[in-house]
């Protein structure tokens, strides 16, 4: 075919034309909160698994409560996005194996008991004040170290599933070339972990944990960079729509946000600060974790928005 | 079992949008929404121009990303003819299917559910042609069973050159464009 | 005026005079007045015919539980073959349009300020009747003029003739197809007519000169064109713009605007010099061929190249291509032909090219139409006219035959000569967009004592009226019978399928009520339109009941080609096809068309061209919700290179300023390879400025507003409108 010069369409459907914009802020917010909660569950689960709950100020006590709240906020955002809200119950009258969104619905159902179980290990004062029986339960659980360990394992596994699913959800939507990469779930999982590590680090009272999380976060950020490289290499070596999609972030319309906010402010800058901090060149401040969290949120916005923009047609348009 | 499809002659289509309007009245499509539309593609430099005009809609693909992503089973393949449909009362409006379609053929109806071309099954099941096919003043659209080698559509595909839209998207579309 | 032409005109419109005696017996039939539709349950399918344009395709309206659902083509109808065009399919929107006129209005402030009081029908008619009676006394009945478009005007025409005015016109002549009819009539002795008598379906070679079939959706023509494409007809498109039709063509000739006659002459010279014409046909039916050859053979393709910019080899090749398929080569006469002021001569050149190819009266060329004529209603004779029509005083335009020149009436309204025009009655035609040079129209309006507009929407012209009468749309009313001349004789009915939503009324009712107020009751002897229609149908042996059920009644089929036995008949003075026209020579015009150069746009200016979009008719469908949804504003086509030079991108908004300093409303640019660099193009009918029609208000730009210059055709008074040049105004 000759070089394509002009293409016009008479279609003008809201949020579809001129480019796809069905998913607005709700989905990236949900994906971000879901991912961060997933990371926090893994962290809390790990602490439980390694017996750190014996420490008085272990982060694993506040994590599940915060996760509970954040995840509920995320789900509320997701609910806001639904266009046919009255029918939301339809999610739970079926399980569709080919649909990550259907698994997601069920994973969320399982995540809540795991979070609650975690909360019950050491319920907060204001809870026991209101529901005294919780002290009872908590005692019972703590009588069985084995049970605590398993709660930890459950939290880690469900956290992994939750974190991975947020990526798989997008990457199975093969019609958006940017999302069409099998590494997207790894990216979202790692990014969720790094945001979670940053978040917990911000509030951790335990010195050891805070140090550990800062180090872990550095590791996650490095992995995240590496995953990015892999994703771009993958996209750039596929078909033209994928190459165009990669260029959207690398040099196209989304490049400024991507380079400045996602890579620069979200990864490189905090990485440098935290490297200096763990090597005791500077002291720990809230700056790096906040940057990581903000970077993680922007990452979801960029991926969702650029992904919707990337298109089999647009690929011909340039 | 039949596999319904369309064969559209781009040589004859003039892009008048009659099909679009017929669809809108037949199916009560709200103002501002389209189940079908016209694409005009031209190549070359004035005055040496080649131009293709075609009417597009859901391709009722054989590989359906929009069905597999649906969390509720609302988006499904109909028993008759492999037509891809959405059951309104099962749809939660999550928009996954809208995102999943590489042709951007779906939209969210103002009432909240995902909507798109139905191949006018309500007409086809009565033995009529889809509204867009039967209105076209250029007679450029043909509808029928692609699995029946004697159908008009199969014969056209055998005797003429054709292409489909976005073959690389892997959806195996069932709308064919004669060139 | 040319009496011969008048006669022929009557012939093709299928009119027959019937004496009052024939009325006896039939008048007694009483048909029930329309029952209300809104109460009915279930699905009803009612035949009628379309009014989204003047083609009058037969339709079936689907009414579900008393609500209009959809309209489809009536398979029995020969015009639509069961398929309507997009506008027709969108006809539902004419009924549901929320911005329709709802009740009669009388102006309460200055003309054009669009301030009204709602009145009852009775008050409106009283007001009009009083003024019309006064005008009759003071200036005579001929001081009223009727502008009317479409079949819905027929009862008003009757009312005006009964009142005593000879002045009745429509922009469809002098602003549209007039030059074509004159050019063909001078050559073949007959007009092309509407629907065009073109046998596109069977043509093996089709030449389109500026006609953009496919964007122009005259249903039957497009259907036939598509069949021709399927049959691999060789298509030659001449257009400064790469139209949809051009994309189907074997040859696309990107002609320089204004030079079509040069191309036509060169084509004819090739055919003459290479002896490619239809020898038998010409020797049998032609006259003046020797003079014609002597003159035409000098126009070489090389000469034409300089004017048209078209490669001489392509000119030769396309001429030979036409000859190869003769007589099944149709050089399409076009429809909107008022371009440069020498349009009747250009149309005559097209007619002559067809004559050389022997396509007139032949299969694949022009068929001989006939109509299933239904006798007229046996009215009492009209009062004798005291004055001649004033559109064409002293036969200034000697070949303006058959119809009146709208702009002539406008001019007389301004000058008061040869006699004053003091009242305009306007039916369904938006003169603001239809006539060139808006200023003159408004000046004429300011001279009026009475201006009445009948319309379905608050159109721009309605905004200038003293009284606005809201008409029910075609789906809500009866109209006169349609027995257009066509390939086969038929008669179609328009009948109501749904109630009007408010106090809108059908035109026949208005004409009758107003007629009665004017003391013309004797001219409206029928009780209602059903009785009128039934009377006419009974005179032909049918009944209203029968036609209401079928929608269409067809006559016996008849041959329509010379080769099938139609007796060739040329109603020219010589009785032959006139290659050399004595009529023209006698009147001081070129007996054989000649090319004259037209002014070209000064640097920085571009010729403004306009045309149609498939989903709109003139400026009357822009508020239809279904059609507006698909095309709500027009774009300015600008050649891509040109756009780049001006730093314009598709979607940018600019204004246009014409040679007289008139500035348009903002319009979106469409930067495209599909047009020449010396012209720009837009779809007609947009940039409307009726404040009561919000959905169209300043949507896009109006070409008509920029058409301040027009060149009058000296043969027939047509107004060539593609003579305006515009430049870009960037700051919007
Ligand atoms: S929008 Fe409706 S049909 Fe589409 S995937 Fe979601 S639930 Fe299924
Ligand atoms: S098949 Fe029916 S639903 Fe699909 S585009 Fe045509 S008219 Fe619309
Ligand atoms: S050509 Fe279209 S608008 Fe005109 S009468 Fe026919 S269907 Fe109606």
Image: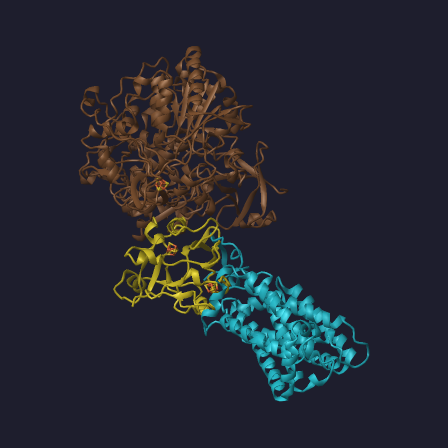
Chain colours: A cyan, B yellow, C brown
Task: In the displayed orientation, state which residue is furthest to the top.
Answer: C137
Q: Quadrant of the N terminus of chain C?
A: top left
Give percent across and percent down for residue C90.
Answer: 40, 44
Give percent across and percent down for residue A315.
Answer: 52, 63
Left or right: where C158 falls relative to A267: left
Task: In the displayed orientation, state which residue is furthest to the front.
Answer: A132
Tally of numbered discs: 0
In the image, residue C633 sits, relative to residue B61, either above or below, namely: above
Q: Nearer the viewer, residue C441 or A41?
A: A41
In the image, residue A13 sits, relative to residue A73, either above or below, namely: above
Give percent across and percent down for residue C512.
Answer: 34, 23
Which of the 4 image quadrants contains residue B133? bottom left
Asked if residue C715 can be seen in this view, the reply is no
In the image, residue C370 sits, relative to residue C404, either above or below, namely: below
Q: Nearer the viewer, residue C732 or C280?
A: C732
Q: Nearer the viewer, residue A69 or B77?
A: A69
Left or right: where C426 falls relative to B134: right
Asked if residue A130 can be seen in this view, the reply is yes
Which of the 4 image quadrants contains residue C666? top right
Which of the 4 image quadrants contains residue A293? bottom right
Give percent across and percent down for residue A135.
Answer: 66, 79
Q: Quadrant of the C terminus of chain C?
A: top right
């Amino acid at each position: 075919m000759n070089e394509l010069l002009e293409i016009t369409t008479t279609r003008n459907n809201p949020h579809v034309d001129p480019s796809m914009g069905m998913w607005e802020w709700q989905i990236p917010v949900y994906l971000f909160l879901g991912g961060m909660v997933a990371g926090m569950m893994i962290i809390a689960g790990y602490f439980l698994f390694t017996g750190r709950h014996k420490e008085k100020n272990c982060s694993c006590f506040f994590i599940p409560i915060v996760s509970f709240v954040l995840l509920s906020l995320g789900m509320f955002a997701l609910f806001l996005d639904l266009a046919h809200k009255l029918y939301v119950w339809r999610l739970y009258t079926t399980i569709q194996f080919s649909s990550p969104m259907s698994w997601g619905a069920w994973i969320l159902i399982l995540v809540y008991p795991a979070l609650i179980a975690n909360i019950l290990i050491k319920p907060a004062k204001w809870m026991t004040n209101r529901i005294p029986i919780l002290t009872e339960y908590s005692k019972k659980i703590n009588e069985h170290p084995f049970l605590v360990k398993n709660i930890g394992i459950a939290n880690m596994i469900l956290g992994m599933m939750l974190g991975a699913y947020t990526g798989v959800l997008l990457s199975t939507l093969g019609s958006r070339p940017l999302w069409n990469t099998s590494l997207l779930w790894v990216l979202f999982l790692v990014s969720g972990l790094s945001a979670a590590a940053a978040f917990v680090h911000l509030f951790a009272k335990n010195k050891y944990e805070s140090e550990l999380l800062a180090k872990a976060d550095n590791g996650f950020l490095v992995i995240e960079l590496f995953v990015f490289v892999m994703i771009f290499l993958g996209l750039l070596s596929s078909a033209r729509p994928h190459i165009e999609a990669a260029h959207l972030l690398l040099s196209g319309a989304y490049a400024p946000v991507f380079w400045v906010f996602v890579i620069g402010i979200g990864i490189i800058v905090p990485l440098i600060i935290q490297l200096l901090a763990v090597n005791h060149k500077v002291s720990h401040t809230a700056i790096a974790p906040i940057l990581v969290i903000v970077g993680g949120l922007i990452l979801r916005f960029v991926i969702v928005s650029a992904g919707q923009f990337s298109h089999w047609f647009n690929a011909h348009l340039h | 079992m039949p596999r319904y499809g369309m064969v559209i002659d781009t040589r004859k289509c003039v892009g008048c949008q009659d099909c679009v309007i017929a669809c809108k009245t037949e199916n009560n499509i709200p103002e501002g929404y389209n189940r079908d539309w016209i694409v005009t593609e031209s190549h070359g430099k004035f005055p040496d121009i080649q131009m293709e005009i075609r009417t597009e809609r859901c391709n009722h693909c054989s590989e359906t990303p929009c069905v597999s992503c649906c969390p509720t089973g609302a988006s499904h393949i109909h028993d008759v003819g492999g037509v891809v449909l959405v059951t309104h009362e099962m749809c939660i409006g999550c928009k996954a299917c809208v995102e999943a379609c590489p042709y951007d053929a779906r939209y969210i109806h103002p009432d909240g559910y995902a909507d798109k071309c139905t191949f006018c099954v309500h007409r086809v099941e009565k033995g009529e042609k889809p509204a867009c096919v039967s209105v076209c003043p250029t007679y450029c659209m043909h509808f029928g069973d692609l699995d029946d080698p004697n159908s008009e559509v199969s014969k056209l595909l055998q005797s003429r050159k054709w292409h489909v839209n976005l073959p690389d998207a892997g959806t195996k579309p069932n709308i064919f464009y004669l060139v | 005026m040319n009496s011969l032409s008048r006669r022929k005109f009557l012939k093709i419109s299928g009119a027959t005079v019937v004496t009052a005696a024939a009325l006896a017996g039939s008048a007694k039939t009483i048909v029930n007045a329309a029952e209300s539709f809104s109460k009915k349950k279930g699905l009803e399918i009612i035949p009628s015919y379309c009014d989204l344009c003047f083609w009058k395709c037969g339709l079936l309206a689907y009414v579900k539980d008393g609500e209009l659902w959809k309209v489809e083509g009536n398979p029995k109808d020969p015009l639509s073959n069961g398929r309507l065009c997009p506008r027709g399919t969108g006809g539902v929107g004419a009924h549901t349009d929320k911005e329709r006129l709802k009740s009669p209005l009388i102006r309460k402030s200055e003309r054009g300020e669009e301030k009204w009081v709602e009145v009852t029908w009775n008050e409106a008619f009283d007001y009009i009747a009083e003024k019309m009676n006064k005008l009759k006394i003071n200036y005579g009945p001929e001081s009223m003029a009727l502008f009317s478009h479409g079949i819905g005007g027929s009862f008003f025409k009757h009312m005006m003739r009964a009142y005593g005015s000879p002045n009745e016109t429509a922009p469809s002549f002098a602003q549209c197809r007039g030059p074509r009819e004159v050019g063909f009539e001078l050559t073949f002795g007959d007009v092309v007519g509407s629907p065009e008598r073109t046998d596109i379906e069977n043509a093996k070679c089709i030449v389109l000169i500026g006609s953009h079939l496919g964007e122009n959706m005259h249903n039957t023509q497009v259907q036939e064109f598509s069949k021709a494409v399927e049959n691999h007809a060789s298509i030659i498109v001449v257009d400064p713009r790469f139209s949809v039709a051009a994309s189907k063509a074997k040859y696309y000739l990107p002609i320089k605007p204004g030079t079509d006659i040069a191309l036509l002459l060169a084509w004819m010279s090739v055919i003459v010099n290479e002896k490619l014409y239809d020898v038998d046909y010409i020797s049998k039916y032609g006259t003046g061929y020797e003079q014609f050859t002597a003159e035409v053979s000098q126009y070489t393709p090389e000469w034409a190249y300089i004017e048209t910019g078209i490669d001489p080899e392509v000119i030769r090749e396309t001429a030979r291509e036409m000859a190869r398929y003769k007589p099944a080569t149709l050089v399409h006469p076009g429809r909107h032909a008022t371009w440069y002021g020498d349009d009747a001569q250009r149309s005559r050149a097209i007619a002559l090219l067809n004559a050389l190819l022997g396509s007139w009266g032949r299969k694949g060329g022009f068929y001989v139409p006939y109509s299933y004529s239904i006798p007229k209603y046996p009215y009492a004779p009209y009062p004798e006219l005291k004055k001649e029509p004033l559109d064409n005083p002293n036969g200034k335009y000697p070949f303006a035959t058959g119809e009146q020149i709208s702009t002539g009436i406008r001019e007389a309204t301004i000058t008061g000569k040869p006699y004053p025009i003091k009242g305009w009655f306007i039916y369904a035609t938006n003169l603001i967009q239809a006539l060139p040079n808006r200023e003159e129209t408004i000046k004429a309006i300011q001279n009026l004592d009475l201006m009445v507009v009948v319309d379905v929407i608050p159109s721009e012209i309605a905004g200038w009226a003293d009284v606005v009468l809201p008409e029910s749309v075609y789906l809500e009313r009866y109209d006169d019978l349609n027995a257009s001349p066509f390939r086969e004789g038929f008669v179609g009915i328009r009948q109501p399928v749904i109630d009007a939503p408010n106090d809108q009324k059908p035109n026949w009712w208005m004409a009758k009520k107003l007629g009665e107020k004017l003391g013309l009751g004797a001219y409206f002897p029928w009780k209602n339109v059903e009785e009128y229609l039934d009377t006419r149908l009974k005179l032909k042996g049918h009944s209203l009941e029968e036609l209401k059920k079928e929608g269409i009644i067809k006559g016996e089929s008849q041959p329509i080609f010379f080769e099938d036995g139609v007796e060739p008949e040329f109603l020219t003075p010589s009785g032959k096809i006139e290659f050399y026209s004595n009529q023209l020579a006698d009147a001081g015009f070129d007996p054989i068309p000649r090319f004259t150069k037209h002014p070209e746009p000064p640097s920085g200016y571009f010729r403004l061209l306009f045309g149609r979009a498939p989903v709109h008719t003139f400026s009357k469908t822009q508020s239809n919700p279904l059609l507006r949804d698909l095309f709500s504003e027009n774009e300015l086509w600008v050649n891509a290179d040109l756009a780049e030079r001006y730093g314009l991108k598709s979607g940018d908004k600019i204004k246009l300023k014409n040679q007289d300093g008139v500035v348009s409303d903002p319009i979106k640019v469409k930067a495209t390879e599909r047009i020449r660099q010396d012209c720009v193009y837009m779809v007609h009918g947009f940039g409307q400025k009726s404040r009561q029609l919000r959905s169209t208000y300043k949507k896009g730009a109006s070409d008509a507003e920029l058409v301040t210059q027009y060149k009058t055709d000296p043969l027939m008074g047509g107004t060539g409108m593609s003579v305006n040049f515009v430049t870009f105004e960037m700051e919007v």
